[in-house]
Amino acid sequence: MFRKLSQLTLGLIILLLIVSGTSSRSTVRAQATPAATASGPLTAVKFGAVTPVADYWPLYIAQSKGLFAHHNLSVELIYFDTTSKVAQAQTTGAVDLSAVSTDTAINAAEKGAAISQIAGINNKLIYSLMTTKDIKNYADLKGKTLAVSDLKDGSTLILAKMLAANGLTKDDYTFLPLGGTSKRAAGLTTDQVSAALIGIPNYFVLLDQGYPSLGFTTDLLPDYQWQSMITLTDWAKSHKDTIVSFLKTMNEATQWLYDPANKDEAVAILAKELKLKPEIAVKAYDAAVVKFKFYAKQSEFTLDGFKAVIQVMGEQNLLKTPLPQPEKYIDTSFIDAAKGN
C-alpha cells in the first residue's frame, strides 16, 4: 500500500513538472502576486507585443504592482519577433489587444483587415543608429549591410529616410531583416551587420561597450506616433468594458511612472523585467521618461505624430495621394471612456 502511494505521489510530481515546463518562453503571465484585490472574477486578456523592451514599461508596472487585477483583469503578454507578426496574430484573433507600429496597423487596414487603432502607446520614435566601431560617419556605410526588423517595418522606413537625408541612396547599402531590437543588437556585436537602429535600453548597453551612434530618429522626426494599440473592430464592440478597464490601468501605471517619487521602484521593475544592470535602467528612465516623455500619459494619440507616419508612408509609395487623415484609422471613444469623458 505504501509503495503504491509513493508511486502515485511521484507520478503526480512528474506530471506537475511537465505541465509547468510547457509554457511558452515568449509569454509572460501578469498578476503572479497581485498587490491589489480584485472584486469579482478576472477577465482574461491576451496582449501581443514585439520583443521585451522599455516601450512597454507601463505594462510591466501594471503587472508588477497588481494594477490589472485591481481592475478585474488577468493579462497575458505574448511576444512576437516583428510588428507584422503581431498584426497577423491580431487579425486572426490569436490575441485580444496588441501593440504594433502605427504604419503596420495602417497597412493592415488598407489591405482590408477589420481592425481599429484604439489608443496611443509610444508617441515618439526613439531609436539610435548604432554602428560597428570602424564606422565614423554616414559615408562609411556605403557598401555595408544594415540590420532591420523586417523590410516593411516602420523603423525600416525611418532608417531609409535617415540614410537619404545624409546622402545615401538605396543602392549604397543592403538591409538584412533580423527581427526585434535585441536581435539587431546581437547582429551588430557579432559583426553580422555594420549598423542598426537600436532602442532603449539596448542603446545604453552598446554605448557602454564602446559602440558609436550616428544620431537619433528624433533628430529627423521629433513627432512620430510610433506604437498604437489595436484590436479587431468586432471584438472592440463586444468588449468595451474590458478595453476601458485596460486603458484605465495603463493610464494609472503611466502616471505612476512619470511621478519622480517612484523613480527608484520603476527602475527596479524594468531592471528585473529586462534583466538589466541597475545603472542601465536608470539611464533608460532618464531618457525615455524624463527627456523624451516617450509614453502616452492618457492613452492619447498625437495627431501631428500620426500625420508624420502617414507622410512617411506616402513618401515610400505605401499610401496613395491624396493622403488620408488620421481619423480614418483611429477610434478615440475608448480613450474618452477611460478618462470619464
Image (tube, rainbow, N blue to C red):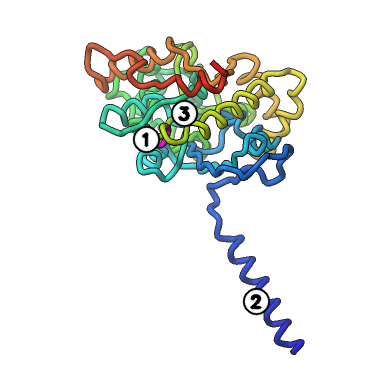
Front of the two marks 1 and 3: 1
**SS for dot 3:** strand
What residue did someone put label 3 on? 229
Q: Relative to residue 299, is residue 277 depicted above or below? A: below
Real-space Cα distance between discs 1 and 3? 15 Å
Q: Horizontally, is 245 left or right of 178 in the view?
A: right
In primary-sequence order, the first of circles 1 and 3 is 3
Q: Please report the residue visible at 59 percent of the width from the left and 28 percent of the height from the top.
A: 250
In primary-sequence order, the first of circles 3 and 2 is 2
Q: Position of residue 163 (x, y in %)?
A: 38, 18
What residue did someone put label 1 on? 234
Q: Please report the residue visible at 69 percent of the width from the left and 23 percent of the height from the top.
A: 256
Q: Horizontally, is 321 left or right of 129 in the view?
A: left
**SS for dot 2:** helix
Q: Give the residue type that dot 3 points to.
A: Met
Does the magenta portion include 105? no
Q: Main secondary structure of the magenta part?
A: helix
Q: Give the residue type that dot 2 points to.
A: Gly
Q: Horizontally, is 112 left or right of 271 in the view?
A: left
Front of the two marks 2 and 1: 1
Q: Position of residue 16 (x, y in %)?
A: 64, 66
> Which circle marks residue 11 in the picture?
2
Q: Quadrant of residue 92?
A: top left
Q: How many marks?
A: 3
Residue furthest to the bottom in view is 1
Magenta-highlighted residues: 232-236
Instruction: Answer few, some or many: residues within 10 Å of disc 3's Cα (few below 14, many 20 plus, some between 14 and 19).
Output: many
Real-space Cα distance between discs 2 and 1? 45 Å
